[in-house]
Amino acid sequence: MTLRIDKPPFLIALDLVAAVLALYLLVRPTGRRMLAGLLAAVGGGLLGWLVVWISDDVFDVFGVGLTPVTTFWAALGFAGVSLAIANLFRSRWWRKVVAVVSIPVFLATAAAGVNVDFGAYRDLNDALGVVPYRSLDLHAERGEVLDIGTDYASTATPGQTVPAKGEIGTVDIPGTTSQFPARTAVVYLPPVALTAKPPALPVLYALSGQPGAPADMFTAGRLGPEMDAFAAAHDGYAPIVVAVDQLGGPGRNPMCVDSREYGNSATYLLHDVRDWISSHLRVSSDPAAWGVFGYSQGATCAVQFATGHPELFGSALASSSELGPTLGDRTLTIDTGFGGSAKAFEAAQPLAMMAANAPYKNSTIVFGVGQNDAKYTAFARTLHAAAQKAGIHSELLISPGTAHDWNTVRHTLHDGFPAIAREMGLGR
């Protein structure tokens, strides 16, 4: 289950097996049957391309643009399956057996290619949603909120041995006020937080895309290694990262607002989660010490919070954000998330909040987007321009050769986090 399915050894082996099976299925006793198999493969490939085109360009089923690489693997998968089906007719029993066995191999090969393009799963555990982290032992009596600004070193105890790496584990953050049905959160504690008397530290929320789960930000987003690398270069200091559930389920999109339909997502994040962090961890009360990192729907939430609540969050790192909270249809969004109030919907848009709260005094937002993600690139440019106009320290990062995927998330995190760290008072 921990075999790396995103690395060359597995991918090359799978491709070779698929190629050998395809070659066997193409070679038939007569030229007519070989031609029939070839035509079936070509027809299947064209059908796969057509399905992707209709799903993506006509009906926008996925809500994001699919890349040529994903289209290629989908077409190849359809071609392989079609070739296998053609071999079920007018063939001997052993060829039928090979054809049946080939179908899952062709599908797995295509899925592996799409996975590499999307950059999501490292192994089967990731693909099955298995959370690879143990529960963290955190107690309320250890929490303390300090009025120290971003001078975290002033609260440190000299002479303590700092571990080489941080620790990642799961925690349950109850919706005490909101009653929001949040799933288990995942927390990263940087090396200095693991000492006997840890200093106060900044906090970074991490919000997955939708569908998604908190652990995605660590498994697919690779947050742990990125924070460990930063900490190694800064005497063990890095933010405490809290990947929290803003969705309440993989198929839900509460839009990080309070609504009757999806529950009080905003109250959960802004009050319950913040209260839990303050009561279980040593943190600074300064808004500059608090930031939000998100992907897709989570990135939209990050921008909402940073623009709407500068008194709570000093920074946001947004990978592939939309312009604002949406369910894809304006009327549906207003009815579901805003009680039918178009005025409330408009007021909740980051562009409106930036105009209302300008000029911002000490806020930083980094917008990241994939080079091949035309729709979200337009969103990012619009938000970036509005942020600059509102006085926010804003950066726009274009991830080369990627689209609306986890490769873009990792690029945004790697190249964009230093600006967030500086806002937090780290890495100057």
Image (spheres, rainbow, N blue to C red):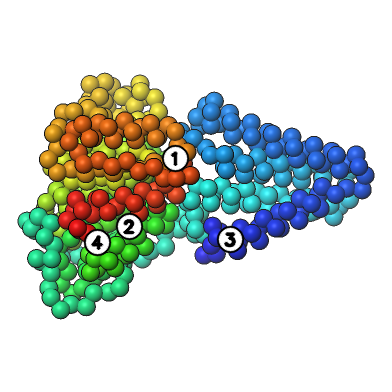
Do the residues bearing badges 3 and 4 touch, measured as CB atoms within 8 Å? no
Quarter-of-image position of residue 386: top left
The CA span between labels 1 and 4 is: 29 Å
**Residue 290 placed where, x, y %?**
19, 50
Q: Nearer the viewer, mark 4 or mark 2?
A: 4
What type is the residue that disc 2 sits on? Val
User: Which mark is first along the chain, 1 or 2?
Assistant: 2
Q: Which residue is mark 3?
A: 8
The CA span between labels 2 and 1 is: 30 Å
- Say whether residue 367 is visible: yes
Per the image, label 4 sits on a secondary structure element best described as loop
Label number found at residue 186: 2
Q: Which residue is mark 4?
A: 238
User: Which mark is first along the chain, 4 or 1?
Assistant: 4
Per the image, label 3 sits on a secondary structure element best described as helix
Per the image, label 1 sits on a secondary structure element best described as loop
Binning the other alpha carbons within 10 Å of mark 4 as few (below 14), some (14 to 19) or many (20 upward) gives many
Do the residues bearing badges 1 and 4 touch, measured as CB atoms within 8 Å? no
